[in-house]
Image: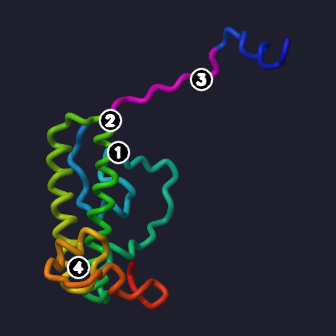
């Protein structure tokens, strides 16, 4: 008889986890959400609270208009990603679906504004931000090693 066979015959229960189903709660504002790692206050469990580290995305003083706009896109993108995780387990939540659609539209609008003011960040913003383009403009902006923000 192997060790595994002997080990599995025990009648003792070492541990059993119970995870309650998350319920909808009003989300944080999106900058607070990014700083806390979740849009949902009910999921912000500070088991091991680290010292407060300033959020570089949240503090926009001294940033260029381009960096500010990129930060807005990043904040909304984070909220969409976190909300997607919620909707994976709550696909019929009306409040969640409504916020998801609102955030998707906001992200598309921000990407279009960024493309119009600076350069396209995504393939789709080549159409939404600069629809009159006559050339492939995906690589128009500076690359990260050239000081770009992509």
SS for callout 4 = helix
Dot 3 or dot 2: first in sequence order is: 3
Q: Quadrant of residue 111?
A: bottom left
SS for callout 3 = loop
Residue holding disc 1: 85
Q: Which residues are magenta?
A: 13-21
SS for callout 2 = helix
Q: Is residue 17 magenta?
A: yes
Residue holding disc 3: 15
**Disc 2 versus disc 4: nearer the observer:** 4
Q: Position of residue 84 (x, y in %)?
A: 31, 47
Q: Nearer the viewer, residue 26 or 1?
A: 1
Residue holding disc 4: 114
Q: Nearer the viewer, residue 93 or 18?
A: 93
Residue holding disc 2: 89
Dot 2 or dot 4: first in sequence order is: 2
Main SS, magenta residues:
loop
């Amino acid at each position: 008889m192997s060790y595994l066979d002997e080990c599995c015959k025990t009648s003792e229960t070492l541990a059993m986890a119970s995870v309650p189903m998350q319920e909808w709660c009003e989300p944080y504002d999106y900058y607070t959400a990014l700083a806390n790692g979740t849009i949902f206050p009910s999921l912000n469990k500070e088991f091991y609270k680290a010292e407060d580290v300033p959020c570089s995305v949240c503090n926009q003083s001294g940033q260029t208009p381009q960096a500010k706009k990129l930060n807005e896109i990043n904040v909304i993108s984070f909220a969409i990603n976190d909300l997607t995780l919620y909707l994976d387990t709550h696909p019929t939540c009306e409040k969640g679906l409504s916020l998801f659609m609102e955030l998707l539209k906001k992200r598309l609008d921000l990407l279009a504004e960024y493309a119009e003011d600076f350069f396209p960040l995504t393939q789709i913003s080549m159409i939404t931000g600069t629809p009159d383009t006559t050339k492939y403009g995906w690589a128009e902006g500076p690359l990260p090693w050239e000081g770009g923000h992509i």
